[in-house]
Amino acid sequence: MKKIISQKGFTLIEIVAYFAITSVFLFAISIFALQIIDASRLSENINEIQYSDTFSTSKFIEKIHEATSVDSGNSIFDNDTGKLALNGAISVVFYLENSNIYIKEGIESPIKLNANATNVTKLRFHEITATKTPTQIVIDGEINTMSNISNLSHTYQFHLSVSLRK
């Protein structure tokens, strides 16, 4: 009589099925992780744009309110690479150069106003003057992220209207 020996272990089909299920599971986890990383980068880019916008517009408002007049001869209005020169206790100039917004106060060195991860593609100033009202400056701009990945790049346009106070 032959004795049947039962062998313990896994068959080849069971091992292949195990690896197939494990591979699908790991693939799903890696796709999910990549989506989280992309969302984090997009959030970071949007935060950089918002920081640049908030900081730049606060400087525009502060310096225009402090100014006594607009130096129209040294300003460039209605141009996408505009320049705004203000007269006051200290002369102030806002301008766009190499995709960055700069402020130059008096004889000090220019200071960059936007974040390093952003570039400014448009900075347009428009002067509105009328009798019996203070001069008003309208500022339009466009800030972009510097990401080379299309779904991570973001553009933000801002519009600001500020009157001289003095």
Image (cartoon, grey):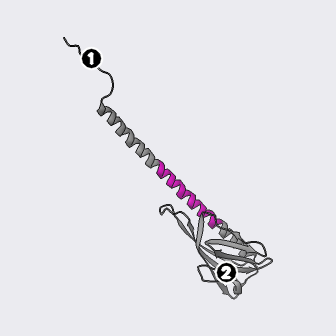
Residue type at mark 2: give it: Gln
- The answer, for residue 133, to whether it is visible in the render is no
Residue lying farthest left? 1
> Could you say which quadrant of the image residue 161 lies in?
bottom right
For marks 2 and 1, give the CA distance: 97 Å
Q: Position of residue 105 (x, y in %)?
A: 76, 74
The rendered magenta stretch, by its main secondary structure, is classed as: helix
- Residue assigned mark 2: 136
Which quarter of the figure has residue 110? bottom right
Depth-wise, is mark 2 or mark 1 nearer the camera?
A: 1
Residue 138 percent coordinates (x, y): 63, 78
Q: Quadrant of the C terminus?
A: bottom right
Q: Secondary structure at mark 2?
A: strand
Q: Residues within 10 Å of mark 1 (few under 14, many from 20)?
A: few
- Type of the residue with mark 1: Ile
- The reply to whether residue 114 is visible in this rendering is yes
Q: Which residues are magenta?
A: 33-54
Above or below: residue 165 compared with residue 11:
below
> Residue visible at 30% across and 21% down?
7
Furthest residue in direction bottom, as rendered: 131
119 left or right of 103? left
